[in-house]
Amino acid sequence: MADVSDPEIANAYNEVRDDKTETNWLLIDYEGPRSDKLKLTGTGSGGLTELKEHLNDDNASFAYVRISYANDKESQREKFVLVVWIGGGVKVMRKAKISVHSADVKAVLRTFSIEVAAKDKDDLEEEPIVVRLRKAGGASYDRV
């Protein structure tokens, strides 16, 4: 089991979900290479572009992102994405624990539309993620 008891994680989650704040992402990393304790390592308001700058190829991380997009001129939607990041330099034992630890993280970061597994920063390009969000959202007026 992963330890997600750091109160800063829950506080950041609530901040990302709050429409009154500009914070639209949070990043959670392991305290150390052998630790199963997770801690908040960053938040920001620059979306996926800014989040990608904080991802490290030697880390396994979890991120939570609010993404805004328009279906048409009249509507603006905000959806939430859980990102499971496994950098190329992550050790085998850490990779093996990620699926189990994901369940623990989802108990804290509970509400999201889609989960994105990312091994490369290109996996976090906004356009394909928005396409997935539109498909997951049900009604699609532009045939996506």
Image (spheres, rainbow, N blue to C red):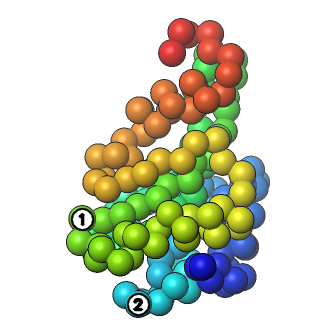
Quarter placement of the N terminus: bottom right
Q: Nearer the viewer, residue 9 or 24?
A: 9
Query: What's the residue at 55%, 10% (across, down)?
Result: 142
Does residue 14 appear anywhere in the picture? yes
Q: Residues within 10 Å of mark 2 (few under 14, many from 20)?
A: few
Give the mark nearer the N terminus: 1 vs 2: 2
Residue 45 can be seen in this image: no
The tag on residue 32 is none
In the rendered image, which quarter is residue 4 located in? bottom right
Camera-nearest residue between 75 and 137 = 137
Is residue 52 positioned above or below 105 on the image?
A: above
Q: Secondary structure at mark 1?
A: loop
The foreground one among 118 and 142 is 118
From the viewer's perspective, is 88 left or right of 72? left
Residue assigned mark 1: 88
Count of numbered tags:
2
Query: Mark 2 is on which residue type?
Result: Arg
| Residue 139 picture location, percent across and down | 68, 16
| Number of residues whose C-alpha sits closer than 10 Å to that of mark 1, classed few (under 14), some (14–19) or many (20 or more) | few
**Looking at the picture, how far across and down is residue 73, in whole percent?**
63, 16
Disc 2 designates what residue? 34
